Image: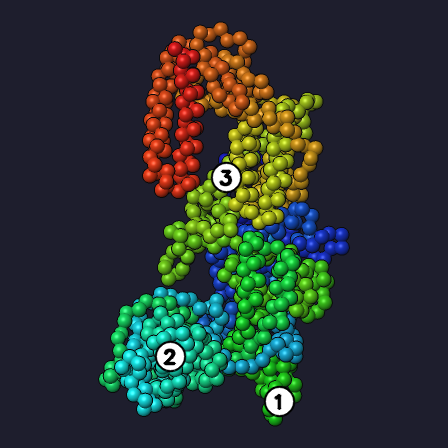
Amino acid sequence: MSQAEIPKTYDPKAVEARIYEEWEHSGAFEADPHPEKEPYCIILPPPNVTGALHMGHALNGTIQDTLTRRARMKGYEALWLPGVDHASIALQNVVERKLMREEDKTKWDVGREEFVERCREFAREARSQILSQLKRLGASVDWRRLRYTMDKRYDDSVLTAFVELYEAGLIYRGNRITNWCPRDRSAISDLEVNYEEVDGKLYGVRYPYADGKGPGPDGNAYVQVFTTRPETILGDVALVVNPDDERYKNIVGRRVTVPFVEREVEVLADDYVDPAFGTGVLKVTPAHDPNDFEIGRRHGLEAVNVLNPDGTVNERGAEFAGMTREETRKDIAGRLEEEGLLGEVKEHRHRVGHCDRCGAVIEPWLSEQWWISMRELAEPAIEALRKGEITVYPDSWRRETIRWLENLQDWNVSRQLWWGHRIPVWYGPDGEVVAAKEPPGEGYEQDKDVLDTWFSSALWPFATLGWPEETQDLSYFYPTSLLSTAREIMYLWVARMIMTGLRFRGEVPFKKVNVHSIVLAEDGTKMSKSKGNTINPLDLFEEYGTDAVRFGLLYQSSTQDFSYSYERASLGRGFATKLWNMARFVSGCPAEAQGRDEASDSDRWILSAFNQTARDYDRLLEECEFSEAMRLVYDFAWHDLADWYVEISKAAPTRETPRILREVFEGVLRLLHPVMPFVTEEMHRVIGGEGLLVRQEFPKFDPALEDAGASRILEQTRLAVSAVRSFRSESKGDGELVGRVPEGVDLEVFSALARVRPTENLHSSSKATLPAGDGVVELALSEEMRREEIERLRKEIGRIEGEVKRAEGKLSNEKFVERAPAEVVAAEREKLDRNTGLLKTLKTRLDEYL
């Protein structure tokens, strides 16, 4: 296209959908085993089938797409494999609410089979949203390979893994404390528990002595315990004190009565008790507190469960049976007061777990569940991480994961839900228990529970590639190249994938893990729908363009969480505009040199600078240093290329310059394409590039292009030009100047850009001496310019003298030097030294004019 035919401004709305369709139609994202190419594979962390694109998806999707596109351009057979998760509890909650809202029915009304079918249908309809939004992001995934954790092949993978682990003796049935959601009537994972600070009360509950030995050492006929949940006293089976607590040594072994249930329990000693908390005495309720459960196991205590699955009190709760937890708490507090068994009641703010999906208060609840014994699975994972078989960015998360694995508890993998992978355990008519993918015979009934979603997700890197079959895809693309994820699921997902990968494939599932930042709200808090501070990336795409948002996110991304900045999206949009304007200019540059000519210093400099940028940029992306990479390429494209070389190409070109400008600009488009795919693809088209940019080669470092000499000359030239431009700005001088230029400057470029006619001899009685790196530029001045420069210098000298005096006053203050942080004092000394040197230079220049 000619420059006149290219639109003056880039319009993302008119371009992005068309370009994505071109990429898809051309098969640009497709990848298959290729014997002559090295594989590169990223498996998309599966978003929930009910999900919508949020800022975390936008950041992580951009990271993965950037790395995949780069690998594709570098010649790898690059596969980014997409998929979605069935979102067991999340989707079941949505369908239950829909059923009640539209038909006034519960899942129990329609029955399990019908309810599961409704979930399946809802999932089919819902997943189109997140998938279309991934396309809007520009995700270069191979859509032919879309996987779903509930599709038939994946279901077979899940059941196979369960059966193998069961037969190896690693899966067992047992009673333990779980996070129980009384609304969903199911155990849930740690990740599905949100802890919130709530205002509650600490109730002083008195347990009367029941052994006839009289009052305790404090003169009271009871032992007092503080609790935030008086309703759980119905399940108390002991009181405990610290064995080193002198206050209570004489009551260890004595017996007390639990109010209302009239249960006599013993006072025991246990190191777990903190003597400083409350009265220094704890009640032990093994069925309703994980710490109490462990105390109970150490002391061989019975666990008395006093709650039903829906959170109401069961028949073991005496007259409180049938009440909700909240009702019971209120009633028990009143009854305790009536009977003289209620001590002090204190206001108490504390953390309470809530179900992430429905908001119900979580109950630590003893229930029979399916568990995986983790120690045998954890040891190989610990060893692999210690040996560095997986590189983690940042490495601190590798060390953290090792620590977590070393202290790993057994994993509860059963859920009391209907939507999900049903546990493949069958109970026979004669008491048989068999783990199998199909019914082992007539009269067998399948376990009613489903598997934790994280169990199926733990198989993701190899199950998506065909396991348990030994497919070509599996042997070629596994282990995968990289996983990019948030730190919140390092333990719940990443560590478990490492364990299952080693267990079922004998290899780690990925060679690298990138733990990306969390995108926070503008005020630095975590985004939350309840707070109303979420940012919709689709709105940002609409306002700024997808490329601008992608660039801005990577520009901010580092190892630290960051508050989202709309300024960075604006920066990205401004960058796209700058590139577009360059594209319009470059479109008029020929691809071949117009006649024979030697490349100038500036020609060789820009080639050398681009070459170094390509090398460093590629290294930074490889090491997942995205923010540094964005700053590097932005600085080169905006400052070196646009601000300097484009201007040189207009003012002092050689015959080689237009070709080199086009070559370097095309190289910039190839560097930026993985990050800003839409706008770079469109620019590639409008400047007449061949084929699709997505299929072009990523720039390679070429040692032959390094030119330290040209780089030194252009550095000195740029400093000299900048010195003159600053002088013109300050002195309001215009028109051509005459001056003497330091050695090592490209005179033609300097003269054209600075509008200074170089001379060896200055005959003017007045001159301006301008520092420019290691040298100076001397300019002849007219009498009027001399007077204006004298006035300007005197004002500047006065300002700097004030700064020097202020700094000297601070540093002469002993209290400041002693009390201020060392870095603050050092910065003040550095400022003083800098201003002292500048003052000397300014006074010398003033003396020259006087």
Amino acid type, residue under disc 2 in the picture: Lys
Marks 2, 1: nearer the viewer: 2
Q: Residue at x 43, y 28 (%)?
A: 834
Task: Give residue 326's quadrant in the image.
Answer: bottom left
Residue type at numbered disc 3: Phe
- Point 51% across, 71% down: residue: 88
Q: x, y (%) of residue 342?
A: 27, 80
| Image vertical order of residue 156 relative to residue 689, above or below | below
Label 1 secondary element? loop
Name the residue carrying label 3. Answer: 575
What residue is pinned by disc 2?
249
Please state if 299 lies on the left or on the right of 799 as rendered. Answer: right
Q: Which residue is mark 1?
A: 432
| Amino acid type of the residue that numbered disc 1 sits on in the rendered structure | Glu
Tell me where residue 553 appears, x and y as whole percent: 49, 48
**What label does residue 814 carry, if any?**
none
